[in-house]
Structures are given as C-alpha cells and as structure tokens.
Amino acid sequence: MELNATFKMPSTKPLMDVEQIRKNFPILQRKVHNKPLVYFDNAATSQKPKQVIEAIGFYYKNYNANIHRSIHELGEEATEKYEEAHKKTADFINADSYQNIVFTKNTTESLNLLAYSLTAKLKKNDEIVVSQMEHHSNFVPWQQLAKQRGLRLKFIEIDKDGNLDKNSIKKNITKKTKIVSLTHISNVLGTINPVEKIAKIAHENGALMVVDGAQAAPHMPVDVKKLDADFYAFSGHKMLGPTGIGVLYGKKELLEEMQPFLYGGEMIREVRFDDTKFNDLPWKFEAGTMNIAEAIGLSAAIDYLNKIGMDNVQKHDRELVEYAMGQLKGIDGIKIYGPDERDAVISFNLGNIHAHDVAQVLDSEGVAIRAGHHCCMPLMSVLGVAATARASFYLYNTEKEIDVFVNALNKVNRVFA
Ligand code: C6P
C-alpha cells in the first residue's frame, strides 16, 4: 500500500511564500477574543501544518500497529515508516545514519538520558560545565547528577550583551572537565552560541560536547558533523511536529558504550535468567512501545521544512526578528534582553509593568506571547528580574503581525499609564 498520503506541499523553494505557508496551518485561521490570532509563542511550541496533522490521522486510519514485533502487513508498514523517520531525522541534521538517532519524548528526556547513561564515565570531583543561560532541562539533570556523584558543576558566565563571556569559557573548560553541555540558541536571550568553537575547546581538553538544540533545530540548518557535537538534543513539537517526540543524536561509538536508560521490551537482543544482551543501536535506547504516530508526524514535519529549505526558514526568522527589534526600540519604557544579533526570540519588560500583565493585555488583542521565567530561573537571577515577556517567531509569522504586536504594546502602556 502507498503509505504517503497525497499531500500538496507548498512549492516555495527557493523563496518562501509566507501567505501560501499560512494556508497550511488551520489554527492560524482562528480568532482569539474576536481578533485574528497572532501566534508569537513559538519557542514554547510551534503550530502544526495540515500535512503533519493528516500524516498522523493517516497512520491511525490506515496502518496502526505496533512496530518491530508484529509479523503482519500493518506491522510491517508501521515499522517501515517508523524507521524511515529515524533516517529522515539523521539526514536533517547531517548525521551518518539512523543508528545515531534515538527517539525520546522531548529534549528534556534526551538530556536526562545522557545525565543518567554517562554517569559510568564520571568519578568524584570531575567537572561538568554548563552556562548561566541554560534552560532547566539542561541544568537540573547535571546539577542533580553532580550532587549524587560528588562532581563539580561550573558555569560559563554571560556578558552584559547576553553572549557567553569569552574569558569565562576559557577559565571554566579545563583538563578536569568531562562534559560541556550548552544550549545552541537561548530560549530567553535569542543568543546564538558558537558551539563549533566551544566543541573544539571541549575536545582539546578531553571533554564531551553536549548541545541542547531545542531552539536551534527548528530555526536553522544544523550539521552535527560540522559542529562536532558528541550529542545533540531537540524536540519535534517546536519544529512543526507533534508533542511526545524528541531526538537524541549521539556519535555511534559513544552510544555503543553507554548503558541503556530504560530497560524492558524491544531494547533487548536476548534475555536469559542470569543476564541480558542489548539490542543494536538505536533500539537499545528505545524501550517499550514507542511514540509511533508522533515519529511519523515528525517525519512529515521534516518533509515540510525540507521542502521550504532550512536556509530560507533561517533567513525569514532572522529578518523578522531584525524588523521587530527595530520597531520595539521605539516603545516607551521597553527593556530588551540579549544581543542585537539573535535568533527569533525577544524577551523584554515594559517599565515596571509585570510581564504577566503585559501578556494579558496582548492576549486581549489576539497576540499570544509567553511571560514568566521561561524555565530559566538561574538566568533570571543574573538578569536581576523575576520574569520577562517574550515574543518568538516562526516561518508563518509576518511583519504585519509584528505591527499588530507593537500597537498592542502601546496599548499596554496606555492601560497602565
Ligand atoms: N522551552 C520555552 O517556552 P521540551 O519541553 O523538553 O520539549 O524542551 C525543553 C527545552 C530545552 N532547552 C531549551 C533551550 C528550551 O527552550 C526548551 C523548551 C520552552 O522556552 C518550554 S519551557
């Protein structure tokens, strides 16, 4: 049976036709408080095109079955599409093979898997280096591991612009460092970190380089070989895919020697009363019935992004953020956090108005943003604030929507004058 539903992909390469793209996203047609929806909460989760929604529906309607175990037509079809999702994901980040790609439920689980499975490589007083701008997902697992194993957790500081401080990078990564784990793009500051350079420093010191790509994989071409990342983690739901599917890329020799994170069905080759042989990569890390529909949805999301071209997505997002930065600078009392050169995220505060109040007034105008600590409480303490408001953009957003957002911010100032 033909497993690909016959979807019409937008023929937008090499230039993006945003109006055409918007037609693929059913949710963008709805209204909020009787106003057209302006969705600027993409760093939290992206919206989904109908191609992704329909691929999931098509699986459940036509070939729903468990994978890697059912010797019948449906089982074989589901297995084929699930394995194809690994191959597409590998190609998407320029990994060698599907064997480098472990499916998890999200970035958080990918990073926890690492903190758990790399523990055998660590001994008392070894050092792990993260930065002050990490999301809790790339912070708490290492902090807790350090506490349990008597390791030292060190922090690369940020400078006044919100970039990683160069001296602090040199000072913290030393021969004692065993793991450096950094975000590729900050979900608060939008900072694009030089992970390729930092991976080089990590490797010169004999440390592993882990990259949290949750905010990068959706917005820019990622080449794990060029970065020389040992591990790279990201989530499907921030890149047009469904929730419940995450990715952990790992170099094969490292994944081979690591202990599985979860034990049970499907991750084994042979089980005897006295011992167990584990399965080949990547299945050794995928225990139990996996998120099959979600993997198929991710596959459709990758098809969609590839059709547009990640270079085009990146160019569009960066143009939007540049336009927004220019417009926002004219707003009374605004303080923007992070560097001028950034990805599609802008965190800010408006005078003394609480970020939640800003978000609420924007919501009444149909503009969805996020307000709070963005799962970065240590970073908030460095910035000296409890919370920020945050707008984040994606491939279906437009300059016109930014104008609506700017007008709504002026309304916030009037309401709280
Ligand atoms: N940040 C945000 O609104 P999960 O939830 O596991 O899919 O992703 C975790 C995560 C890890 N690293 C970074 C840099 C992230 O931005 C996120 C998710 C969302 O900023 C939800 S808190």
Image (cartoon, rainbow, N blue to C red):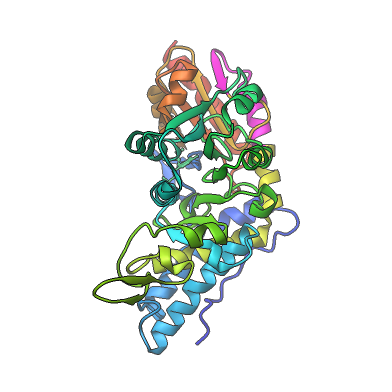
Where residue 116 sits: x, y (%)?
Answer: 38, 49
- Pick the front one: 140 or 352: 140
**Residue 260 drawn in magenta:** no
Where residue 288 sits: x, y (%)?
Answer: 32, 68
User: Residue at the location (37% across, 72% down)?
Assistant: 277
**Residue 325 drawn in magenta:** yes
From the viewer's perspective, is 117 left or right of 326?
left
Whether 203 is drawn above or below 105: the answer is: above
**Furthest-right residue in view?**
14
Q: Quadrant of the C terminus?
A: top left
- Pick the front one: 226 or 78: 226
Number of marks present in the image shown: 0
The image quadrant in which ligand 1 is located: top left
Where residue 243 sits: x, y (%)?
Answer: 41, 55
**Magenta range:** 320-337
The reply to whether residue 132 is in sight is no
**Furthest-left residue in view?**
273
User: Residue at the location (55% across, 62% down)?
Assistant: 100
Where residue 144 sits: x, y (%)?
Answer: 35, 36
Q: Quadrant of residue 184?
A: top right
Whether 134 is drawn above or below 208: the answer is: above
The reply to whether residue 189 is in sight is yes
User: Residue at the location (63% across, 35% down)?
Assistant: 193
- Pick the front one: 190 or 382: 382
Q: Quadrant of residue 34?
A: top left
User: Residue at the location (57% across, 53% down)?
Assistant: 22
Q: Quadrant of residue 206?
A: top right
